[in-house]
Image (tube, helix red, strand yellow):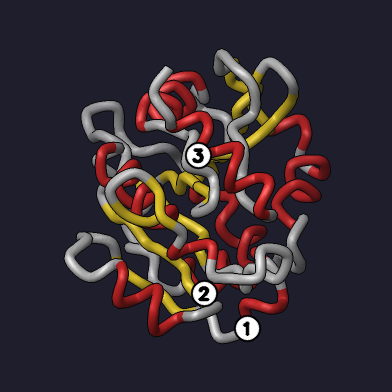
Amino acid sequence: MPPPPADRRPFVCGLVLGAGGSKRLGRPKQLLDYGDGTLLGHVVDVARDCRFDQTIVAIGGFADEVRESLEGSAAEVVVNEAYGAGCSSSIAAALAALDPRCDVLVLMLGDQPGVSADTVAGLLSGRGDAPLAVCRYDDGRGHPIAFDRDVFGALADLHGDKGVWRLLDQRAGDVAEVPIAGPIPLDVDTPEDYRAVLDELAPR
């Protein structure tokens, strides 16, 4: 599919994955205190600051409580009943709610509060016309990841937690690695991870 005309700004959508069951943490990580709100709420606020044309949050584990915590946000909430099947199932659920005008989808992790709107802006400005773009941090590749609409069909067919990374490997020639200064932002899977992201938040 051809890119949008040069005189039209791309229609960019954001997808925040927040459907995990928090098995390793032992409590809903989406609802952990972070800053003035919750961990997931912070990432949704970052997505708001990115000024996406559409923002979708995929939830699943602890859906009622998580949905309530997101009341007042402008994000569209999609419940993935099959969240136990991994992140790919949340992506598929969100794609069904995606605005048909979407040219580019930016995938963000709801448990990765260290990603900023500047990170997303750098990814989008550095991707060129690549079908897929991933952040290249000082210590490796990481989220967020951007997908051109030509890749949406492949995204819908993914399976499991690592489906996105397998797709990047399979389509390596189509992937732009956009340099982003600093280490890969921490994501919260364990109590130790949570303490670490709180330490990063604390004033120095």
Residue underneath mark 3: 198
What is the crowding at mark 2: few (fewer than 14 residues within 10 Å), some, or many (at least 20)?
A: many
In x, y percent, where is residue 163? 75, 57
In x, y percent, where is residue 47? 34, 45
Cα–Cα gap, marks 2 and 1: 9 Å
Which of discs 1 and 3 lies nearer the camera? The answer is: 3
Which is more N-terminal, label 3 or label 1? Answer: 1
Cα–Cα gap, marks 3 and 2: 31 Å
Residue underneath mark 1: 82
Identified by mark 2, the residue type is Ala
In x, y percent, where is residue 143? 59, 38
Residue nearest the viewer, comparing 195 with 50 = 195
Residue underneath mark 2: 93
Identified by mark 3, the residue type is Leu
Q: Is residue 87 above or below residue 183?
A: below
Asked if marks 1 and 3 touch (Cβ < 8 Å), the reply is no
Asked if marks 2 and 1 touch (Cβ < 8 Å), the reply is yes
Instruction: Give the residue at x 74% y 42%.
Output: 168
Q: Is residue 47 above or below residue 94?
A: above
Identified by mark 1, the residue type is Ala
